[in-house]
Structure formats: C-alpha cells, structure tokens
C-alpha cells in the first residue's frame, strides 16, 4: 500500500511556487484513496526522503519541497 503526501514548494529554474501536489512513495495508484495516475505529481518519494529534501536545492529534483503533509 502506497503512502501519499501533499507537498508545497517551488521550481528551481524560475522559483514559481506550487501547492498541494500529491506525491507517492510507490506506484500503486487506485489502490487507496481513489487516486489515478493523473492525480500523482511524482512517484518514489518516501516520507524520510521528503524530510531530507526539505528546503534543499542540492537534490536531483527539479523542484524544492518547502513543506508537506501526509494524505489520509
């Protein structure tokens, strides 16, 4: 079963902010919460990885996560 998180942040290239993007730690959409592929912004981020990425521009991601909440 996947864990889902709502993230806020900004794009590194132009600093455009975003809010409420849904990320998942695994690719099993539709299994829980009724989410489909188009609802998921990014796959493969666990809660620990999100915590490590918070406010860090030196990741391999194109965006910076500034805050998150777990989606229940």
Image (cartoon, grey):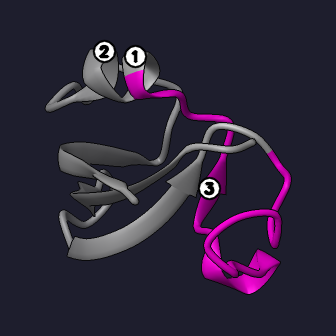
The part of the chain drawn in magenta is: 27-47
Residue 34's spot in the image, x, y percent?
A: 69, 81
Q: Nearer the viewer, mark 2 or mark 1?
A: 1
Q: Residue at x 14, y 32 (%)?
A: 55
Residue 29, picture quadrant: bottom right
What label does residue 48 carry, if any? Answer: 1
Instruction: Name the residue carrying label 2.
Output: 52
Residue 7's spot in the image, x, y percent?
A: 30, 57
Contact, CB < 8 Å: mark 2 with mark 1?
Answer: yes
Q: Residue at x 30, y 51 (%)?
A: 12
Q: Residue at x 24, y 51 (%)?
A: 69
Residue 37, picture quadrant: bottom right
Residue 65, picture quadrant: top left
Q: Residues within 10 Å of mark 2 (few under 14, many from 20)?
A: few
What label does residue 42 carry, if any? Answer: 3
Distance Cα–Cα, label 3 vs label 1: 15 Å
Residue 49 lies in magenta, yes or no? no
């Amino acid at each position: 079963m996947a864990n889902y998180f709502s993230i806020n942040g900004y794009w590194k290239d132009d600093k455009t902010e975003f809010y409420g993007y849904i990320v998942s730690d695994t690719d099993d959409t539709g299994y829980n919460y009724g989410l489909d592929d188009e609802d998921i912004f990014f796959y493969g981020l666990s809660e620990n990885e999100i915590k490590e990425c918070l406010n860090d521009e030196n990741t391999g991601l194109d965006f910076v996560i500034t805050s998150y909440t777990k989606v229940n």
